[in-house]
Image (cartoon, rainbow, N blue to C red):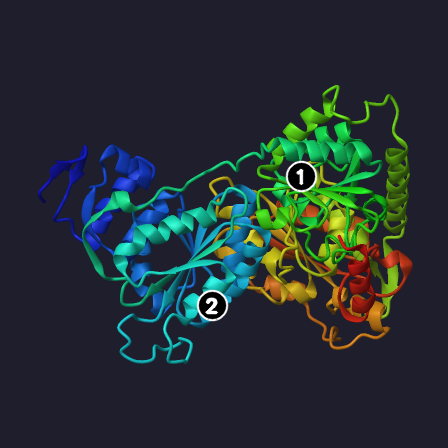
Amino acid sequence: MAAGRSGGRRDDTAADAGEAGRRLRARAVTAAGGADRALARGALPLRCDVTLSEAVVLGLLRQGVERFIVVLGHGTTDLGEVLRVYEAEGALRTYAVRNEVEASHAATALAWTTGRRAAVVTSIGPGALQAMAGSLAAASDGIGVYYLMGDETTQDEGPNMQQVPKHEQDLFLRLASTLGNAYTLHTPEAVGTALGRGATTVFHPWREGPFYLLLPMNTQPAILPRFNLAELPEATFVQAPVCMDESLYLDAVAALAEARRVVVKVGFGAQNAGLEVEAFLEAADAVAVHTPIATGIVPYGNPRNMGVGGSKGSICGNWAMENADLLVAVGTRGVCQSDCSRTGYPNVRKVITINADPYAATHYGSNVPLIGDAGGALVELTRRLLEPRGGARPRRSRPSEWLSICTQKKAEWQAFKQARYDCPTLPDPVWGREVLTQVAAIKCVTDWAKSTGAVCFFDAGDVQANGFQVVEDDRPGRTITETGASYMGFAASALLATNLTGDPFYGVALTGDGSFVMNPQVLIDGVLHRATGCIVLMDNRRMGAISGLQAAQYGKTHATWDHVPVDYVAWASSVRGVAAFHGGYSVASLAAALAKAKMHEGLSLIHVPVYYGDHPLGGLGAFGRWNVGSWVEATQKMRHDIGL
């Protein structure tokens, strides 16, 4: 094997593109502690013969993507072979799962909880479509995930099996490009460009997202002779710029000086600016209301935090939104449920928006857009408020009237919740006895999780809605609530992430029966990949959130329930390695089941029969508006009357 020198690195023009050469390169990556280090030290040849599949893998390793969650098929056999060799040499990990949606959720949860990125690998056709469907969660919540998908061959020898059956080119690229950023590696030499675009999407400084890399079946094994590995881009970590437009800050300070009832809507985009938000609340004599996804950014114990607001908000959060005269929107997109379909602030006539995304920053009318990093803008705005000539009201030794009224509303909300905690069971006709309410069960589980340091993942539906009303997080990351897409089956699948990281953690998936059966594969894959966590399955034999919405709008329910009994304990117990328990019919029995589940080294499931009905103590209710069903006409009219 001839070796030379080029740019300070070893140049190997005769490198083997087959297994022997791959093993050498994989060993070099492992020995150096990463592809980037191996290149920097010259352990990897600067130029070598590699297939496109190997170039993609090396490029992802250079970006720190070392975990591949896969459902392999005929569309990715060559890529799978590269993964096999590199895993055998310790350069990466491959996790085979049974469903592409599950793979997508696991990768999303991994990035969300740990910051580590994974690549989801699928075959062609149906598998790719399933992964795209699952990627709605990553896209909606702003989480960076790579998707590697098999695609039709480029020489058009005839229809490819499982491809979209039309005589047109790049149909999957068209689909993927509609969902997010995508690239087809029709030309293998473009791999560096493709991965560069992927990095700017997956590691975007303020709005991460999924990146779809389509790999035609015939270009995957194509050899790139003397390929320059320096073309493979590193991951870029860029800080969003801070708005420094003095005129905008002057406008914002003037608006704050004039206002008397300031509400700050805190979204996920403020996740790294909690201290800055709290300082601003004091300087502006404001109260905070957060989106469901943003629990803990401002600790719930902060007297200025009014909790969640929106169409499924809290008494105090929605009261603050309804009565504020100025809105400061920080890191939030104004999603329909979060701002009551643009009717959440009927008395606001001026908005200050702090967001790095220009589209989100200009969502509302009568707006002062501070486009840039949330924390930096809040620091600048707070400094100006506290200057002697800033125009802000001086600090008070006692609460203002606005804070005092909001504090009373928060006490009312706490009493409202406590009344439901004090009545943890109700008679249910389906179960033929008293069973736990979802509110009481969620309270029990989340309190237990907080005491043990477990991370809670909330599934879509009633469990999710009651969940973000119940939790009182003191920091971000205690609860992960996938409200962007409200994807049924997310929570259970997310438990795979507990052991996909180098630092395993304990997770709790709070899910309903409807959501669980959407993605039950985790019962098998969780054992296979040694997930450490518990599925708390709250069973009311229906899609409770939709039944409740139907009843509220039309007084009747339809096609959202059944009376088919399922023995979930037996189902889970049938998978060797899963521990299954009945949660019983009381808070004490559920707490005991949680303790048993924690003692099990691996995955467990607790089945909890829960109440569904119209008893006022059976749920936490809704305090906002939403542009759906029979509410459409009134909500839309109100939105246009407000004109914000």
Mark 2: which amino acid? Answer: Leu
Instruction: Say whether residue 468 is visible.
Output: yes
Element type where label 2 sits in the image: helix
Question: Crowding near pointer 2: few (<14 within 10 Å), some, many (20+)?
Answer: few
The percent position of residue 623, horizontal first and vertical second, equals: 84, 55
Which residue ends up furthest to the top in the rendered image?
A: 388
Q: CA distance from mark 2 to mark 1?
A: 43 Å
Quarter occupied by residue 282: top right
Three-letter residue code for mark 1: Thr
**Could you tell me which secondary element the residue under label 1 belongs to?**
helix
Residue at the image position 29 percent from the left and 57 percent from the top = 53
Give the label on residue 452, or none. Answer: 1
303 sits to left or right of 164: right
Instruction: Please state the horizontal and vertical placement of residue 245, each as a whole percent of the image.
Output: 60, 33
Given the current orientation, which residue lies at the most extreme left position? Answer: 2
The relative height of residue 439 versus residue 384 in the rendered view (above or below) is below
Residue of label 2: 175
For the point 47% across and 45% down, which residue is it?
203
Q: Nearer the viewer, residue 146 or 178?
A: 178
